[in-house]
Image (cartoon, rainbow, N blue to C red):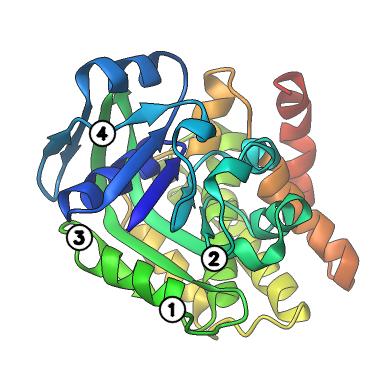
Amino acid sequence: MKLCIFGAGGIGGYLGARLADAGHEVHLMARGEHLAALQSDGLRVESIHGDTDGDLPATDDPAEVGPCDAVLLCVKSTDTRTAAADMAPLLDDETAVVSFQNGVDNEAWLAEILDESHVVGGVAYIFSTIKEPGVIEHTGGPARFIYGELDGERTDRIQALDDALSACEGVDAVLADNIRVELWRKFAFICAQAGMTATTRRPVGDIRETEPSWEMYRRLIEEVCAVARAEGVDLPDDTVSEWLDFAQDLDPGMYSSLHYDLTHDKPMELDALNGSVVRHADDVGVDVPMNEAVTAILSPSAARRE
């Protein structure tokens, strides 16, 4: 397959390296010092599943890449619409644009700009970041990537992507029967983990040990699940307990990308996380006071970075 990794950061860089190792034609889209390092020194991945490196073509101009079989979109949700507006040179009639991003709105935002037929849902479970320009560090998580057509159809293109990812070392590839369930399932966890570590500015271990904070963590998950079900998303009954058990096992020093962005003066994904919960809740008439609180507390900081 010919693939474009649109946003070759922690997630995209990892995927790009693994797909290239499996023999696919992979093009990286990046910017700034990271792009310069990719062009001069190539891409290196340092991973708990094994290190790899390669000299992959990298650019900030989609026209240099041309039409692809699939575009894996791995930019922050704050950049979704901008990325979509630049994507035309990468697309032909059957190109899949797979969103491996945080939140449940990116697919709709993409469809506002691209033909909806291009849009594919995706979920990534991996802890990886840009260690330094040109170097991706994968420190944990199952490296599980879940994806599927929005209508659940097993199309030729999604089967081809599944075959490609399933053949990659260091990738746990899952073709979902219902990708909307998977999107909301992860959303329930990330809104709690991101919301609580950012508002308290404390790691998950401190939150677990503080009863009112741990209770709020639980309620954040419950609220997201309630909104999802009100929208007709058939989440598993054990979603809340599953994520609480998962969070209990996290390294006590773990924060979230939202906390990182808050403390490093970077654009924040608040609007795609807890802010999105509030919007969806308004649409279906569900009360979400915990998500409203997180949104209210962090909104001034998020607005200052826009």
- The quarter of the rendered structure image containing the N terminus is bottom left
For marks 1 and 3 on the same chain, the one whose residue lies earlier in the sequence: 1
Label 4 and label 2: CA atoms lie apart by: 24 Å
Residue corresponding to mark 2: 94
Question: Distance from label 1 to label 3 (Cα)?
Answer: 19 Å
Q: Position of residue 219 (x, y in %)?
A: 64, 63
Q: State the image coordinates of residue 178 (x, y, percent, origin top left).
A: 54, 81
Q: Which mark is residue 95?
A: none
> What amino acid does circle 1 point to?
Asp
User: Do callouts 1 and 4 mark residues in contact (Cβ within 8 Å)?
Assistant: no
Residue denoted by label 1:
156
Secondary element under disc 2, as helix, strand or loop, is loop
Report which residue position mark 4 lands on: 56
Q: Is residue 155 left or right of residue 150?
A: left
Snapshot quadrant of residue 127 = top left
Q: Which residue is mark 3?
A: 168
Within the image, what quadrant is residue 194 found in?
top right
Q: Please state the horizontal and vertical placement of residue 12, each as a whole percent of the image.
A: 38, 43
The reply to whether callout 1 and callout 2 are in contact (CB within 8 Å) is yes
Question: Taking the image as drawn, is residue 252 in sight?
Answer: no
The residue located at (20%, 60%) in the rendering is 168
Residue at left 56%, top 39%? 76
| Viewer-side residue, 288 vs 88 | 88
Q: What secondary structure is marked by label 3?
A: loop
Residues at marks 1 and 2, CA–CA distance in whole angstroms: 10 Å
